[in-house]
Structure formats: structure tokens, C-alpha cells
Image: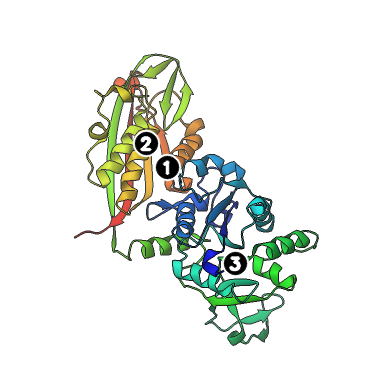
Amino acid sequence: MSERSKSIAVIIVAAGKGERVGVDGNEVPKQYRLVAGTPVLSRSIKAFLDHPQVTHVLPVINEQHRERFDNLGLGDPRLLPAIGGGANRQASVLAGLMALGPLRPDLVLIHDAARPMVSLEVIGDVIAVLQNFDGALPALPLTDTIKRSIDGRQVAATEDRRQLSAAQTPQGFRFGQILSAHMRAVNVRREFTDDAEIAEWAGLRVGMVMGDVENFKLTYPEDFVRAEHILTGAKQMETRIGTGYDVHSFEPGDAVWLCGVRIPYKAKLNGHSDADVALHALTDAILGAIGEGDIGVHFPPSDMQWKGAASTIFLRHASELVARLGGRIVNCDVTIVAEAPKIGPHASAMRAVIAETLGISASRVAVKATTNEKLGFIGREEGIVAMASASVEVPRID
């Protein structure tokens, strides 16, 4: 059987929390963050679906992210339903291997979702090496001098960098062999750093191919900046600022919507949608930054489909327009002017909704509140005003 006729399954490991990029419970896990307008996980999956020798792709995800994964809207007959991962990477890979058991692929490639820029060439090279080895991985020679230290303070030795390489993924194996090795490794009281190490421990012969400097792992915030520049063709970026203003009066009701949060109150805001005055101002700020008019242009109040609609829909649309330009939202700032209801107790939840909707860190969102010192229609508690600003970074076109 030729290598081209072999069945080749791919496991995309995406079950981590992405903590090292500053992700907390209110922020977007790194595998779902946008890079050049596309989620990291979508890019990683597509890289393998684009390879003609790949027969199946299996995402292994964090079950807490199930809704996020479903919202990626991925569709391909070779894409298997995502399964939940384990407590660590090793457990997640074993879960993926077990799930592939009924398919019994000849070969399996295991890839970190956080490496979204893997090339077709690297994938093909790993597959080719499996004709002569039990396993294979891409690796890059080290160029820095490597020092060993026992306590992190004093040098104990200098390593021979000519014998050292930095491992990447995908790592490929004969399916039956790596499944057996992983099942045996469960009983070993140590955590292996990658699948190639498990293969080596099990006595399998692992070959190497040349890796790719662009096949780096997104781990720290600066990695996302680097990836963005690569994927946008290293275009020169420019920062633009937009502002927004909106006002809504009160009418009889029992709650108001502000920044996507429902706040019980003796009245509600009057408007065609949910009348979220703060999100309307922020949407206008983002649209203004990219020269796309205002919220009324995109969602006319005369259109009945938007009657009672959640204003997060409008905000997400503005964010998507930025992404289509190859840009990103740097930060946004919302100020709510109201005598009542009290905004402070809800500010954290408001920031979380905005961050979730825009796909950015909550640290890039500010929500502030002030009163009008009992002056004017705001002071008489007849309505609420919101002002917002947003900065976006987009490719320069002139």
C-alpha cells in the first residue's frame, strides 16, 4: 500500500485554557482569539483540511468551550465531531486516540491548535518520513548558545547546540503504535512533554524533518502580534480613533439594558431594539473609526427585524467589519451618564460582555459612570446618555 493511499487522521489538541496569554474567566481562550480576522483554532483545522492526504480531522476541545467551538461554524465531511479533552495535554491526546479507534487510521498526526500557521510542506514532510520511521516531527536547529543551570543563577555547563533542536508539531506516528504507547504511559508517574517523548520512551524510532520558523506556538501576547504581522503580509498598520454618543429616554418598564447587562429598575429605556444606549454609542465609535457610518446605516430603526434585538448583535457586526479589513480593536472606553440606576455594581459584568462580544481581553475595555449632578433631563431622571471611544488598528492603504 503506497503512502498516498494510507488513511491519515489528525488530532488537533485544543483543550487548554490559554492562561499564559493572560486569559481569565471573562476573556477569550487563545485558541478562539482572532488572528488576522480568523480564530486560531479555525486556522489550525483548515491547514490540515487543505492537505490532500488527510482523511479525518478530530478536534479535542475543552468542554467548557463547547459553545465557542460550535460558533466557529466549521463544515467539512472530513471534520469529525469534536470531543472533550482531559486534565492535561497527554490525557487529551489519549482521548483523541481512543476516539479514533473505530476508524483505525494507518497514520495519525497530532498537532497543537496554538500553531495555526503550519504549512502544507511541513505536514507533507512529516507524512513522508513515516515511510521509514515509527514517528516523525518537525524541528528547528538551535542557534543560541544553550547553558545548563541547576539553580537558575549559576551556569553548570554549556550544551553542544549542534546536537539540539526545538521540537514542533504536527508529530506523526503509526496509529497502533502510538495508541499502545500512550496507553502504557498512563501508568508512568511522570508527565511527558510531547508525543514524541512518549514514542521514544516506548522504544519507537522517531525521525525528524526541518521545521518552519513561522510554525511557532502562540503562547504570549507578543506571539499574537507577530502572527498578525505575518498573516497580514507585514502590512504597515495605523491606529484610528472613533467616538460615539447616544441618548435614550425612559418609559414604563422594570429593567434597563446597559452594556449587555440587564439591570432591574423602575423603568426601561425607549428604543427600537433593546435600547442599550451604551452599546449603541460604542458601536458608533467602532464604525466611526473605520469610516463605516453609524449604527442606523447598518441597522435601520425602520427595519422590524431589529425590534427588541440585543444590541450585542450590532456591536459584534462592527467588530466583524474591523476583522474583514485585517484589523483589530485595540481598546474601547464607555462612559454612562445617569442619576439612576447605579452602574458601579455592574461594571465588571459589563466589561465582560463587551470583551466577549468583541473577542478581546477585558483589560482592553473600560466602563465608567457618572451623574449629571441633578441637572437637566438626566438630573430629572428622564433618560440616560452614553459616550464612547474606540481605537482600532488597521492596515494602511495609502
| Residue that carries the numbered disc 3 in the rendered image | 172
What SS does tag 3 mark?
A: strand
Tell me if residue 345 comes above or below residue 133 in the rendering: above
111 with respect to 287 (left or right):
right
- Say which quadrant the N terminus sits in: bottom right
Q: Is residue 336 visible in this depiction of the protein?
A: no
The quadrant in which residue 153 appears is bottom right
x and y, in percent, of residue 155 in the image: 66, 83
Tell which circle, 2 or 3, labels the residue nearer the N-terminal end: 3
Residue type at mark 3 is: Gly
Residue nearest the viewer, comparing 181 with 5: 5
x and y, in percent, of residue 119 in the image: 45, 66
Which residue is rendered at x = 51% and y = 50% of the image? 79
Which residue is rendered at x = 49% and y = 39% of the image? 352
| Residue that carries the numbered disc 1 in the rendered image | 366
| Residue that carries the numbered disc 2 in the rendered image | 335
Residue type at mark 1 is: Ala
What SS does tag 1 mark?
A: strand
Residue nearest the viewer, comparing 296 with 181: 181
**CA distance for labels 1 and 2:** 8 Å
Q: Which mark is residue 120?
A: none
Tell me if residue 6 comes above or below residue 91 in the rendering: below
Tell which circle, 1 or 2, labels the residue nearer the N-terminal end: 2
x and y, in percent, of residue 368 in the image: 41, 37
**CA distance for labels 1 and 3:** 45 Å
**CA distance for labels 2 and 3:** 53 Å
Disc 1 versus disc 3: nearer the observer: 3
Residue nearest the viewer, comparing 259 with 43: 43
Residue type at mark 2 is: Thr
How busy is the neighbourhood of tag 2: few (under 14 within 10 Å), some, or many (20 plus)?
A: some
